[in-house]
Image (cartoon, rainbow, N blue to C red):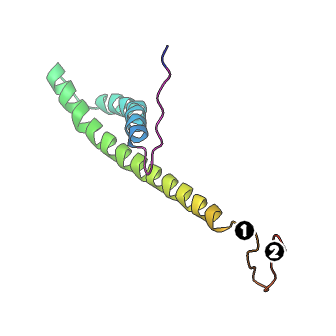
């Protein structure tokens, strides 16, 4: 068996966004379409399909936007956390605020 390849992703992981949108849309959209279809007369399969598309498309769109915004927000907060750690390093003989030297005195 060959090993699975891994990739370092910079920025928003759009693969995760698409997969999450797909799953959440099915989990939320199918029950919503089923409940709403109980109140509408759908005489043919064409009418049922058209109804599912009319109701499901807005659910899919809203889900995609919410998931993408969530992923962007999480990525931005992870980026902010990473930059805070980079600025806080103290090395040998680095000056601190009260004019004292820290590190090696040799």
Q: Nearer the viewer, residue 11 or 26?
A: 11
Q: Is-magenta flag for residue 8?
A: yes
Q: Nearer the viewer, residue 99 or 19?
A: 99
Residue occupying image coordinates x 48% and y 25%: 4
Q: Quadrant of residue 89?
A: bottom right
Q: Residue furthest bottom?
A: 99
Q: Position of residue 105 (x, y in %)?
A: 84, 74
Numbered circle sitting on residue 32: none
Q: Residues within 10 Å of mark 1 (few under 14, many from 20)?
A: few
Residue with the mark numbered 2:
102
Q: Which mark is residue 90?
A: 1
Q: Residue furthest right?
A: 105
Label tally: 2
Q: Which secondary structure, mark 2?
A: loop
Whether residue 55 is visible here, answered yes or no, is yes
Label 2 Cα crowd, 10 Å radius (few <14 / some 14-19 / many 20+): few
Q: Position of residue 106 (x, y in %)?
A: 84, 73
Label 1 with label 2: CB-CB less than 8 Å:
yes
Location of residue 104 (image quadrant): bottom right
Secondary structure under tag 1 reads loop
User: Which picture quadrant has residue 61?
Assistant: top left
- Towards the viewer: 68 or 9: 9
1 or 2: tag closer to the N-terminus: 1
Q: Position of residue 68 (x, y in %)?
A: 40, 49
59 relative to 47, above or below: below
- Residue at position x 22%, y 37% in the image: 54
Relative to 24, is 72 above or below?
Answer: below
**Which residue range is magenta in the image?**
3-13
- Residue 44 shows in the view: no
């Amino acid at each position: 068996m060959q090993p699975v390849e891994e990739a370092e992703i910079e920025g928003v992981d759009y693969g995760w966004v698409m997969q999450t949108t797909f799953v959440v849309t099915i989990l939320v959209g199918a029950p919503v379409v089923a409940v709403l279809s109980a109140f509408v007369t759908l005489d043919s399969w064409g009418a049922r399909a058209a109804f599912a598309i009319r109701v499901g498309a807005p659910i899919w769109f809203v889900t995609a936007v919410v998931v993408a915004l969530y992923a962007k927000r999480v990525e931005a907060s992870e980026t902010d956390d990473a930059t805070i750690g980079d600025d806080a390093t103290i090395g040998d003989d680095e000056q601190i605020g009260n004019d004292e030297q820290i590190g090696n005195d040799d």
